[in-house]
Every structure is written in structure tokens, then in C-alpha cells.
Image (cartoon, rainbow, N blue to C red):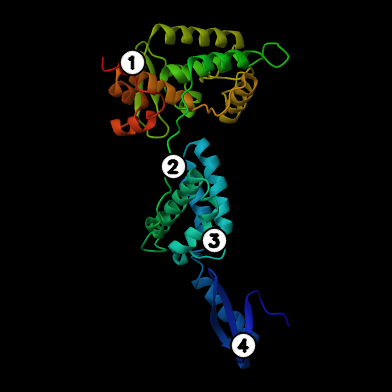
């Protein structure tokens, strides 16, 4: 007769083999002479007492439901991918069994990509923190694993490049105007004039446009920033109002598609990538516009103004963000 899964007969007894990482734990159920009913009864009792299920698979699934869903949509997309990969890597582990060497082994393939490596490390650190909250373990093994240094991005976007990208956003390869061109150009201008993140720009609603300026509440930190009106920002507001009238949109979002629906991150990202490809400009990301905004603000108004625009809690954060983006200007000795 075929025995249940993971149950084996050994030394005149029935054992249940429990996977613990790369090890196997043999748990005695009953004597062979007591018969199969005794074995099934012991197996049922063991399964009930082990029902808490401390497996990494279950831990990650619970983390996705309880923790990940509270994060920004863009963040969740990365977290889903990373957590699924980690679930496969630790499929045979219980949360209590994970040690620092196991984590290092799992994230070692990403050593050539420091940012990715650090993202996986950060995910494992939070998963182990969550395991402590659940009572599955008392320590966090990831605390002993160092992050990899990530050199700051040095790319500074010039005014000329922005103009070229906007032209490329307006016109397709066939020379005809694109349907999304005006809105993408407005998004680019808003990114530079306000220095805000793409997620906060796409979430911008008309109610945030006040008489004093535009109020942003960053999704990343929750900090509130009021960007006061300037002639150029006011002109941009009017362009967006005109676009809204043309589309006859009823959504509360400022940045919308031709169908009047809020722009998604993927939709805006696709339009941006097409524009920079048509413009023939390489090594440029949309968030480089934020770096340009803060760098230029620092140059024209000082580090404190740049810090306030960026919503940073310290000037150190701002200085690290804009460092090496643009040469510091200083006159010669004589």
C-alpha cells in the first residue's frame, strides 16, 4: 500500500520527513506493528500541531497581503517580482531556519548589479522583521549583511536635451503630431518646474492646485511641499486647463490620457521612452528631471531651497542627491 506523501517506513516505524532548508528531519509517527490506523492518527495529530505553518512561502504570501498592499503601486510592482523570486529561493525553508549565509547565497547572483542586490537584501530584511513580529524568530540575520556601495548617478540633463525630448514627444517618426504629445510635454515641464517624483506627478489632482501654489504630498515619505506659483508654472497650469477642456475629462487627475483616464506609470514611461529614442538621447531616465530641478535650484537659490523643494528632512540627503550632477562654478584666483 502506498504511504502518504513524505511518510516512510524505517526501523519498524513510520516517519514523517520534514524539510528544513537543505536538511531533513525525521519525525517518528508510530510503530509498524500498531498498524496503519495508528500511523494516520499520529500523522493527523502532527499536522494539526504544525498548522501554524512557519514556512517562508507562507510568510511571504502573508507579507504580500498585510504589508506590501500598503505601499505605492509602482513600489508593489517591484516587490511582487522580488518576493516571488525569494519565495522560490527559500521554498524549503521555515522562517526560523533562515541564516545569514542562506540570504547571501540567494542574493549573490545580483552582485554585479549593486542596486538590485540591495533591493533583494532590503526585501529579505523586511521579511525577517515581519517573521519576528509573527513570533517565528527572535533575530534578523540580514542585519549582519552589508549593502553594496552604489555610486551616485552623475547624469545632468541639459536644457537643450529637454527641448529635443519635448519635440520628439510631439512628433512621431512619420513627422505627424502624436496624440499624447501635449500632455507628455506638460508632464516633463511639471517634473522640472516642481522637482517632484513621477509617482506624485501622476497622482496630482486639480484640488491640489491652490491660489498659493501646488500642494504635493509625497507618496514615499508623506512630506508635504507647496510649490509656489511662478510665471512659467502658471503658464503650465493654463496649458493643462486647456487640455482638460479639449478632452472634456471628468476625472480629478491632472495628467490624463486621450481617453480622459489617469495616466498610469507604465503609460507615461512608454511615452517617455519613445520620445527619448526619437530624440536620439541615451542614458537618461525620467527621474533625472528631478535631479536637474534640485541641482538648478541649488545653483540659483541655495541648498536650503533645494532641500525644501525635494521634501528632504536633511540637507545631507539633498547634497547627496544633487552631488556631481553639474560642475560647481567659481571664478579664477585672479
User: Residue 151: where, in percent of width, then height?
Assistant: 43, 39
Mark closer to the chain start, 1 or 3: 3
User: Residue 116: where, in percent of width, then height?
Assistant: 51, 45
Give the residue at mark 1: 300
Dot 1: what SS? Answer: helix
Distance from disc 3 to disc 4, alpha carbons, whole Å, reads 28 Å
User: Residue 119: where, in percent of width, then height?
Assistant: 48, 46
The front one of 14 and 305 is: 305
Please rate how many residues cluster around mark 1, counting C-alpha atoms within 10 Å: few if below 14, some from 14 to 19, many from 20: few
Residue 147 seen by the camera = yes
Mark 1 vs mark 4: give the one in front. Answer: 1
Q: Based on the displayed image, in which of its 4 quarters is residue 91 positioned?
A: bottom right
Give the residue at mark 2: 150
Mark closer to the chain start, 1 or 2: 2
Q: Residue furthest front?
A: 334
The front one of 65 and 125 is: 125
- Residue 61 vertical placement versus 96 (above, below): above
- Residue 328 vertical placement versus 317 (above, below): above
User: Residue 209: where, in percent of width, then height?
Assistant: 42, 15
Please rate how many residues cluster around mark 3, counting C-alpha atoms within 10 Å: few if below 14, some from 14 to 19, many from 20: many
Distance from disc 2 to disc 3, alpha carbons, whole Å, reads 26 Å
Give the residue at mark 3: 90
- Residue 31 vertical placement versus 192 (above, below): below
Distance from disc 1 to disc 3, alpha carbons, whole Å, reads 51 Å
Give the residue at mark 4: 10
Amino acid at each position: 500500500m502506498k504511504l502518504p506523501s513524505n511518510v516512510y517506513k524505517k526501523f519498524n516505524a513510520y516517519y514523517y520527513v520534514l524539510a528544513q532548508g537543505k536538511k531533513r528531519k525525521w519525525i517518528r509517527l508510530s510503530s509498524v506493528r500498531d498498524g496503519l490506523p495508528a500511523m494516520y492518527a499520529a500523522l493527523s495529530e502532527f499536522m494539526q500541531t504544525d498548522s501554524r505553518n512557519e514556512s517562508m512561502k507562507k510568510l511571504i504570501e502573508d507579507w504580500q497581503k498585510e504589508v506590501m498592499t500598503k505601499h505605492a503601486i509602482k513600489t508593489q510592482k517591484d516587490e511582487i517580482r522580488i518576493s516571488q523570486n525569494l519565495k522560490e529561493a527559500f521554498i524549503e525553508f521555515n522562517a526560523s531556519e533562515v541564516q545569514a549565509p542562506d540570504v547571501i547565497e540567494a542574493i549573490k547572483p545580483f552582485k554585479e548589479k549593486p542596486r538590485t542586490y540591495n533591493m533583494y537584501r532590503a526585501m529579505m530584511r523586511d521579511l525577517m522583521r515581519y517573521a519576528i513580529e509573527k513570533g517565528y524568530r527572535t533575530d534578523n540575520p540580514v542585519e549582519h549583511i552589508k549593502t553594496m556601495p552604489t555610486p551616485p548617478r552623475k547624469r545632468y540633463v541639459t536644457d537643450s536635451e529637454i527641448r529635443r525630448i519635448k519635440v520628439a514627444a510631439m512628433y512621431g517618426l512619420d513627422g505627424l503630431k502624436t496624440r499624447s504629445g501635449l500632455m507628455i510635454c506638460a508632464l516633463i515641464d511639471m517634473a522640472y518646474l516642481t522637482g517632484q517624483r513621477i509617482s506624485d506627478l501622476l497622482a496630482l489632482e486639480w484640488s491640489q492646485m491652490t491660489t498659493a501654489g501646488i500642494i504635493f504630498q509625497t507618496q514615499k515619505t508623506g512630506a508635504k511641499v507647496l510649490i509656489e506659483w511662478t510665471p512659467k508654472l502658471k503658464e503650465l497650469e493654463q496649458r493643462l486647463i486647456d487640455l482638460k477642456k479639449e478632452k472634456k475629462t471628468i476625472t480629478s487627475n491632472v495628467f490624463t490620457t486621450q481617453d480622459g483616464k489617469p495616466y498610469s506609470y507604465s503609460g507615461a514611461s512608454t511615452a517617455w521612452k519613445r520620445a527619448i529614442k526619437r530624440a536620439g538621447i541615451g542614458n537618461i531616465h525620467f527621474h533625472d528631471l528631478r535631479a536637474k530641478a534640485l541641482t538648478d535650484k541649488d545653483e540659483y537659490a541655495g541648498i536650503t531651497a533645494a532641500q525644501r523643494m525635494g521634501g528632504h528632512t536633511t540637507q545631507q540627503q539633498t547634497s547627496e542627491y544633487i552631488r556631481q550632477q553639474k560642475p560647481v562654478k567659481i571664478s579664477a584666483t585672479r
